[in-house]
Image (spheres, coloured by chain):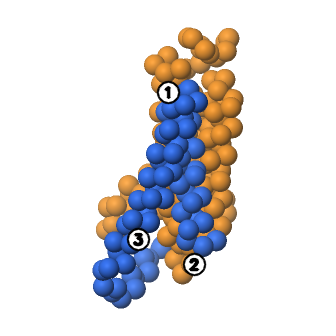
Chain colours: A orange, B blue
Amino acid sequence: MAGTPSGLSTRSPALVAVIAWLVPAAGHLLLGRKRRAALFAAVIGCALIVGVRLNGNLHRPLPKQPMSYLATLGSMGSGAPYFFLRYGLEYSGDPTADGFEYGTAFLLSAGLMNLLLVLDSWDIATGRKE
Amino acid sequence: MNHFALMFLYALLLGLFFTALWKRDRGSQIRLFLQVFGGLIGGAIILGWLMYFLPSGPPAPIPPIQ
């Protein structure tokens, strides 16, 4: 694979995708894209921290609200941080906080950005992208 | 943080993210960053001014969290 450091081309794309989902930017790091991985980690980490500091909503499924399932999938895109926040810290957000809507946008965007990184890692691991 | 600072930070993060994701050479990276960043900031300001002329309604209800 062109541009891939030696030994990394043999990694399974599925394994890379799973690791990329679990730990934001880890897929790119695993594939030798260190500078890009650092930037992606900084961007997603910043979005998560700002979202939590603003008490944004960490989406979870709500009965009779189909859109909440979609939003939950998007939020879960951030991988391990989602589960750590939700189950480790029992974080859920505060709807009465001033920055609730902004924080929700940051948290949801962090998940969606990481999902795009999973797809990008897959493409790099399969040789479709440099 | 005020509304504009948050909007600025959000546009900055998305601009950096999509630039690093989609472009490789420096020239097209700068162009895409300016497009995404400027589009988000400029679009929000234009939309904000358009909404200024709409009548204001009651505050939105607080969504339930379980």
Q: Label 2: which residue?
A: A97
The percent position of residue A6, horizontal first and vertical second, equals 68, 11
Indicate the amino acid at tag 2.
Ala
In terms of depth relative to the viewer, which is nearer, A121 or B22? B22
Which mark, by number, is residue A122? 1
- SS at badge 3: helix
Chain at numbered mark 3: B
Q: Which mark is residue B48?
A: 3
On the rendered structure, is A26 left or right of B61?
right
Q: Amino acid at mark 1?
A: Trp
* Helix, strand or loop for disc 1: helix
Instruction: Determine the residue positioned at 62% across, 37% down.
Output: A25
The CA distance from mark 1 to mark 2 is 38 Å
Q: Residue at x 59, y 18 (%)?
A: A11
For the residue marked with disc 3, what is the amino acid?
A: Gly
Identity of the residue drawn at 58% across and 30% down? B26
**Label 3 Cα neighbours within 10 Å, binned few <14 / some 14-19 / many ≥20:** few
- Above or below for A73 versus A52: above
Q: Kindly identify which chain the residue marked by label 1 belongs to.
A: A
Please give the chain letter of the residue carrying mark 2.
A
Q: Marks 3 and 2, how far apart in space?
A: 22 Å
Q: Locate the N terminus of chain A and report the quarter of the image it occupies.
A: top right
| Residue drawn at x 65%, y 40% as measured from the top left | A39
| Residue farthest toward the bottom in the current orientation of the protein | B58
Answer yes or no: are tags 1 and 2 on the same subunit.
Answer: yes
